[in-house]
Image (cartoon, rainbow, N blue to C red):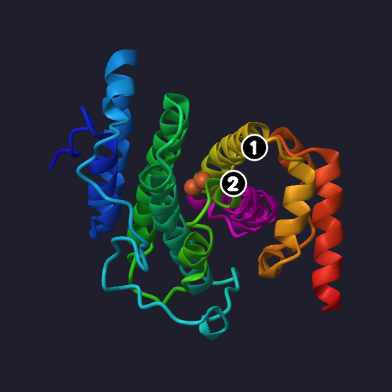
Amino acid sequence: MQAPSLQGDCFAAVEQVLLHQAPAEKAHHSIGLYEQWLGMSAQEQQAALATQSASTVIKLEEAGRPDRPALVEAKLLSRRRMGSKEGRVALLHSLAHIEFNAINLALDAIYRFRDVPVAYVTDWLKVASDEGQHFLLVADRLKELGSYYGEHNAHDGLWEMARRTDHDILVRMALVPRILEARGLDVAPPMIEKLKAQGDHASADILQRIYTDEITHVEIGNRWFRHVCNERDLDGAAVFRDLLAGPSSAYLRSPFNDEARLQAGFTTEEMQIIRQMEAEYNKR
Ligand SMILES: [Fe+2]
Ligand SMILES: [Fe+2]
């Protein structure tokens, strides 16, 4: 099955994939959308940012997702100990869920915020395509280990952040790539080491590939966050601090991977703010 056509109305096509429920098909469509986009001329891409789109922006309580995994509270999920195959399956299952949600988050960044330059759409279609590839890699690895995406429960924390940031592109850029995705940069390297220590090099290689791509996703989020701040003549550091004074600082958890975060475009001042806001959150 082919991805829907982006010609003339990219938002309608993106909406269709965003609402698509079957995970592997959604992943393939996301990859297909980006390939299609790269094959379009600059004029065609500009024309695809249709002001009169067949798709209307609405609040999405849920993006398209399959019946399973069941979504439960994070604290009810079984803890992952990587010492056993079951532990590694649980880790990969939660990773598949993250990647599946990441496809939806990337597509939603286009579907929802439409007064944007072509380059914004290009960037987020690239992210959606990467996330689609990540999902397929992890889902295939789960199958090799005798499991599948949907076998275990998962939590709704990622889409919850999407709901909480759906009113403003500035807030979305500040919190989804720069908080949620950036957290992946902190946790991936130790996980990769543990997988290697278990002798699971196939899974470690997949995580390494994901880690490398995620640095570019955080960079894209940082870049568009700054773009919107500039457009609105706002001080990015101050905006970020204000946003983290709210419930979103609950997602901050040290230790932070400064090297990868600076590479992804965080400033040292922002890293200080992140540490400060984590400490303040822990005192609440
Ligand atoms: Fe990813
Ligand atoms: Fe990502």
Q: Identify the disc placed on residue 170.
A: 2
The image position of residue 224, as x and y in percent, is 58, 35
Q: What residue sits 36% from the left and 78% below the top? A: 70
Taking the magenta stretch, the answer to whether it contains residue 15 is no
Q: Which residue is mark 1?
A: 232
The image position of residue 158, as x and y in percent, is 50, 63
**Does residue 274 show up?**
yes
Whether label 1 touches label 2, CB < 8 Å: yes
The image position of residue 136, as x and y in percent, is 35, 49
Quick check: 56 above or below 76? above
Drawn side of residue 193 relative to residue 172, left or right = right
Answer with mark 1 or mark 2, whichever residue precedes in sequence. Answer: 2
Quick check: 227 above or below 11? above
Q: What is the quadrant of residue 147 in the picture?
A: bottom left
Q: Tag 1, which secondary structure?
A: loop
**Nearer to us in this view, 170 or 35:** 170
Taking the magenta stretch, the answer to whether it contains residue 201 is yes
Residue ranking furthest to the bottom: 76
The magenta stretch is 174-203
Q: What residue sits 24% from the left and 47% below the top? A: 55
**Nearer to us in this view, 41 or 8:** 8
